[in-house]
Image: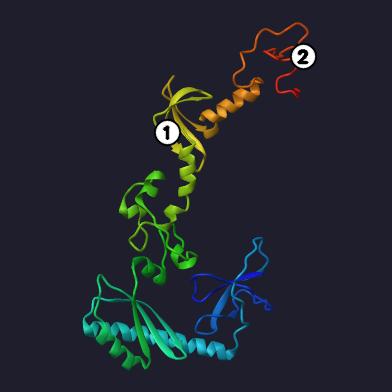
């Protein structure tokens, strides 16, 4: 059994073992954390999954009125800390931008996440924040990708950012991945909300690598069912190759199997009924069935592709 919860609306999903509880979608549940149980909303009701998943944290129960009141007070503390941090940053004239604030009430600790173009001396800011907020304050500088993950937003595809919903780790993405997928190498077209290359460039890259490794390249001469031609492009999602025919210059989209040499050899081998290295089929011997092949070692009367001993 597995369920999914989220601490923020449209935020990252966290998966739990429901244990003995059966919360419905929208119910408030308790999630175990390092700072104790925290309130989250159930967005995926408990259900059986096909995969064998182990090691998931176990849901600690349904949130009560006391838990909801504590969660509301903590959210108010975070909002207050965000406003206070921005005001003091302006007073200290520091090149910092507050991204998010986390708060733990036992003992009271405020963690302020910020972005800056370079390293910042914020020792005086920490002292003022601790006096204004009444607790220990930690400031952590984050990079552009973590900034987009914490703030959230909508990507070029019209969906919520992957890093803010389901991605846990940032994998390296290179311009080579965009080139392999025939995408325009334009920073405005392949950059995400963080200003870096989009993480989704890595999703389909293995598919393109496998396709290019077993498909004729652009400019290669190939034989198609409609005649010989030259490869001018690829349609990887459709598993097709665009070929310009030599006869009339017309372009056609052929399946990858129809132009790959390995597939042709396979069809020639098993459709002709001859093994590689055997001679060509000679005239039919007397007594052989119409259309039968009588090559070296072949018995009269055997059909092509039949069950030969």
Examine the rendered structure and indicate whether residue 261 appears above or below residue 196.
above
Which residue is rendered at x = 62% and y = 24% of the image? 269
**Label 1 SS:** loop
Examine the rendered structure and indicate whether residue 198 appears above or below residue 73.
above
**Which label's residue is closer to the chain start, 2 or 1?**
1
> Could you tell me residue 137's position as x and y percent?
35, 86
> Could you tell me residue 273's position as x and y percent?
67, 21
For label 2, the residue is: 301
Circle nearer the viewer, 2 or 1: 2
- Quarter of the view holding residue 272: top right
In this picture, residue 76 sits left or right of residue 29: left
Examine the rendered structure and indicate whether residue 197 appears above or below residue 244.
below
Label 2, residues with CA under 10 Å away: few <14, some 14-19, many ≥20: some
For label 1, the residue is: 217
Please, which residue is most extreme toward the left here?
Answer: 93
Q: How many marks?
A: 2
Which residue is rendered at x = 54% and y = 30% of the image? 262
> Could you tell me residue 96's position as x and y percent?
27, 76
Image quadrant holding the N terminus, namely bottom right
Marks 2/1: CA–CA distance = 44 Å
* Front residue of this view, candidates 299 and 59: 299
Please, which residue is most extreme toward the top here?
Answer: 286
């Amino acid at each position: 059994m597995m369920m999914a919860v989220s601490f923020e609306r449209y935020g990252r999903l966290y998966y739990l073992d429901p244990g003995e509880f059966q919360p419905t979608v929208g119910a408030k549940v308790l999630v175990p954390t390092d700072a104790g149980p925290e309130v989250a909303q159930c967005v995926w009701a408990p259900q059986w999954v096909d995969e064998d998943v182990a090691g998931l944290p176990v849901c600690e129960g349904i949130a009560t009125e006391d838990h909801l009141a504590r969660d509301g007070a903590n959210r108010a503390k975070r909002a207050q800390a965000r406003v206070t941090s921005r005001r003091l940053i302006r007073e200290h004239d520091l090149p910092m931008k507050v991204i998010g604030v986390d708060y733990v009430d036992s003992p009271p600790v405020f963690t302020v996440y910020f972005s800056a173009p370079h390293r910042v001396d914020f020792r005086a800011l920490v002292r003022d924040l601790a006096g204004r907020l009444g607790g220990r304050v930690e400031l952590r500088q984050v990079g552009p990708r973590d900034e987009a993950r914490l703030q959230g937003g909508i990507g070029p595809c019209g969906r919520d950012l992957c890093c803010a919903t389901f991605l846990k780790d940032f994998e390296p993405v290179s311009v080579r991945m965009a080139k392999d997928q025939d995408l325009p190498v334009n920073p405005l077209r392949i950059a995400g909300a963080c200003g870096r290359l989009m993480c989704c460039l890595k999703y389909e890259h293995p598919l393109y690598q496998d396709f290019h490794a077993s498909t004729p390249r652009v400019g290669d001469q190939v034989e198609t069912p409609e005649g010989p031609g030259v490869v001018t492009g690829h349609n990887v999602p459709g598993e097709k190759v665009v070929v310009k025919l030599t006869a009339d210059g017309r372009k056609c989209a052929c399946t990858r199997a129809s132009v790959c040499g390995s597939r042709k050899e396979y069809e020639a081998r098993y459709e002709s009924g001859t093994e590689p290295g055997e001679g060509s089929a000679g005239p039919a011997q007397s007594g052989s069935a119409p259309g039968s092949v009588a090559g070296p070692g072949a018995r009269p009367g055997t059909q092509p592709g039949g069950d030969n001993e």
